Amino acid sequence: MKFTTDAVTKCAARLGTLSEFSKFPDIIFETPLVLLYTKRGTVPHLTKDVLKMLTNEQQLLSVSLPSVVTMTDSIKYPTLLTIQDPAEENSPTKRKNDSIAVWTKHGYHYLDSKKYMDTVEILKPDIYMALCDGDVNKDSTKKRLSKSMENSKSQLKRCYQRHESSEILKNNFLLGPVEGGFDLHAREESVKLLLEMNLSGYVIDGIHQNGPNIQDLVFTDIEKVVQHTINLLPAEKLKVSMGCWNPLVVLELIESGIDIFDSSYPYVLTEASKALTLIRNNDEQDVFNMQKSY
């Protein structure tokens, strides 16, 4: 697979393309790109027939580990595999060394790097994250942040070694998660390790714990840490930000140089019986308002 971009500066909006998918050589996606959010390989609230009525264009699917870890059939669409479901808040659980917990409908599953990479080789996602412990936010303690960094570092090294030696995954994109919470020095340490590896791109991770509450964040809450992180990364590499960001935050993230997002936000609104209404205010700037739908 190949990512090309017109980026000339590190922290600015840019255009790009994803192409040369090994299973879908004729497909080209333009970035900035919104992933089609799925649960267990299907789009929530939409049947396959209804989806075809809405669009005939090929989509890049967002597939999360909790929704597919118990399903080992290969998914026959372009996919990006994430560790956690961006629409579901990370459930608190007892942590184990060298393992990451994911919450599924069958309960907790603890995965180390070997089990995770075995799953990746079965699912064959076109793009996937290295296994990581990004379950932190701005309120996390220094002890929790340190554990997150240590665990993510060890998982990244093992996933990278397995990826480099895998014939099955040699044409697939491995994304390195940038961890460190809201500690800028910790993020610098995380990026330093990532730059030692030949990764295809990066995920700006470890700034929230997923779930519906993310829709209420404003860009100023995350601006400093996001822009500092992006400025540390190579301008030409793919950059991803997962989470049910509201539309205004998405626009700001695009301006900062993020290439790919997921579309869990509409799903979260639908589950809360809400609809998104776009309105234009007096100074002709687009703003958004959420209204309940019955």
Image: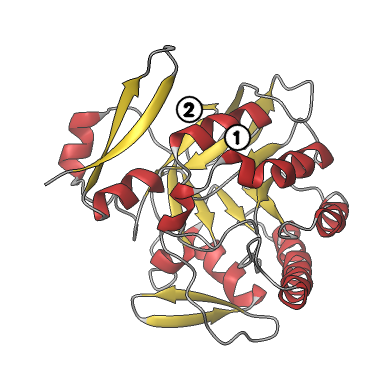
**In the depicted structure, whether residue 20 falls above or below residue 75:** above
The quarter of the image holding the N terminus is top right
Q: Which residue appears at 55% of the width and 38% of the height?
A: 260
Where is residue 201? Give x, y as percent: 70, 43
Where is residue 60? Give x, y as percent: 44, 39
Query: Where on the picture, by quarter, is residue 276?
Result: top left
Give the residue type at disc 1. Leu
Residue nearer the viewer, 118 or 215: 215
Single out the residue that lies furthest toward the left. 294
Q: Which element is circle 1 on?
A: helix
Residue 254 lies left or right of residue 269; in this view the side is right
Where is residue 162? Give x, y as percent: 72, 65
Query: Where on the picture, by quarter, is residue 289?
Result: top left
Q: Which element is circle 2 on?
A: loop
Q: Which residue is mark 1?
A: 253
Residue 266 lies left or right of residue 27; in this view the side is left
**In the depicted structure, whether residue 192 falls above or below residue 4:** below
Where is residue 135? Give x, y as percent: 60, 68
Mark 2 crowd level (few <14, some 14–19, many ≥20, 10 Å Cα): few
Instruction: Answer yes or no: is residue 19 visible.
Output: no
Mark 1 crowd level (few <14, some 14–19, many ≥20, 10 Å Cα): many
Q: Which residue is mark 2?
A: 26
Instruction: Answer yes or no: is residue 242 visible.
Output: yes
User: Of label 2 and label 1, which has the lower sequence position?
Assistant: 2
